[in-house]
Image (spheres, helix red, strand yellow):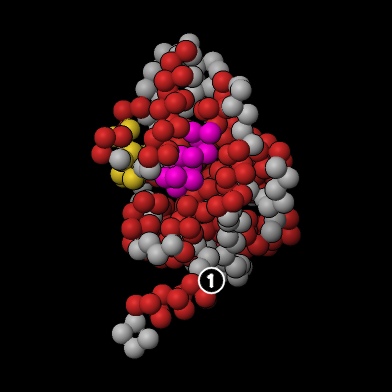
Amino acid sequence: MNWKQALKDYEHYLKIERGLAQNSVHNYILDIQKLIQFLEQHNIKESPIQLSKNRVQQFVYEVAKIVNPRSQARIISGLKSFFNYLVFEDYREDNPMELIESPKIGRKLPDTLSEEEINNLIKAIDLSKPEGERNRAIIETLYGCGLRVSELITLKISDLYFDEDFIKVTGKGDKQRFVPISSINKKYITIYSNEIRVHLNIQKGFEDTLFLNRRGKQLTRAMIFTIVKQLAEKIGLKKTISPHTFRHSFATHLLENGADLRAIQQMLGHESITTTEVYMHVDRSHLSDVLHQYHPRK
C-alpha cells in the first residue's frame, strides 16, 4: 500500500463509515499530507505500513518547531486516528503514534457577546440595502437558534416549521435535530423571505435554500464571517468575534438565565454533555446561585 492509496481509502472511510462533514475530512487528510510532505523532503521511502515510530517522532519534533501547541495537538490527534484506521483494517499491527503525547493545552473559549452588544450589532445593519434584511435574519438565526455557520448556510425553507415554532437543522455527520425558534426570529426570516428573497433570480438547485447571495446562490462560510466582521468594525467592538461567537453566546445566555444543561445540549446538537459543559464558561457566582436556589440545605 502506497501513501496515495492509503489516503484515498482513509478519506472514503471518514466520509462513508464515520459520516464526517467535508470540512472535518479535509482537516484529517491535511494532517497526513503534512507527514507525506515531510517524508518526501527527507527522501524517506517508507510506506504507511512500514513507517517506524522513530520516523513519526522525528516528524512530530519538526512540527513542534513551526506550529503552536494547539496545532501540534491537532496534527498528532489526526495521525493517531489515521494509524488506528490502518490497524483496524489489518494493514498494520501497531500504531506508531501510540506513545507520542500531545502537548498540554488549555481549552480556549471564544469571546461571549452581551445582549447589549448583540443588539448593537443588529442595529448597525443597513436596512436600506436589500442584503440588510437578509443579514438581520442571519444574525438573529445564529444567535436565536445557536447554529453553526455550516448549519446556517444549508438551512432550507422546507426546514422551517413555523407553526410548531421549530426549525430542522442538519448538523455534523448529517445528523438532524429540531431547534425551537422565537417569534422575533420568525418575524425577521419572514420579512426577508417575503420582501427580499422573493425578488431574487434564484439559480437552479437553490430554490429551497433559505439564505441566498445577490446571484441567487447559497452563501459561503466566508461571506458570513465577512458580514460579522464588518458589523463588529462598524460599532468599534474590541472583541475578536466570528459567527461561532453567536452560538457560544446563545448557550451561555441560556445557562445564565437558568436553562437546563441537557436542553442546551440538545439544541446545540452535542453528542456528549461533556462537550456542552466545556463549551460554556460558567462563572463561579452562577454556580453558587444555582446551589442556593435548588439545594435542600441552602
Q: Nearer the viewer, residue 77 or 294?
A: 294
Residue drawn at the location 47% of the way across and 52% of the way down: 250
Q: Residue lying farthest bottom?
A: 297
Q: Position of residue 200 (x, y in %)?
A: 48, 14
In magenta stretch: residue 133: no
Q: Position of residue 58 (x, y in %)?
A: 66, 61
Q: Position of residue 243 (x, y in %)?
A: 56, 43
Quadrant of the rendered image containing residue 124: top right
Q: What residue is disc 1 on?
A: 283
**Residue at (43% x, 62% y) in the render:** 257
Asked if residue 51 can be seen in this view, the reply is: no
Q: Quadrant of the C terminus?
A: bottom left
Percent position of residue 258, x then y: 40, 65
User: Does 66 appear above or below 19?
Assistant: below
Q: Which residues are magenta?
A: 136-148
31 sits to left or right of 208: right
Using the image, determine if residue 34 lies above or below residue 168. Answer: below
Along the line of sight, which residue is nearer the eye, 240 or 143?
A: 143
Q: How many marks overall?
A: 1
- Nearer the observer, 265 or 196: 196
Q: Amino acid at mark 1?
A: Asp
User: Left or right of 83: which side holds 88?
Assistant: left
Image: 15 above or below 58: above
Label 1: few (<14), some (14–19) or many (≥20) C-alpha neighbours in 10 Å = few
Q: Residue at x 38, y 57 (%)?
A: 264
Element on which disc 1 rests: loop
Q: Nearer the viewer, residue 41 or 19?
A: 19
Q: Is residue 207 visible?
A: yes
Q: Quadrant of residue 171?
A: top left
- Per the picture, the main secondary structure of the magenta-coloured stretch is helix
Based on the picture, tell me whether residue 147 belongs to the magenta stretch.
yes
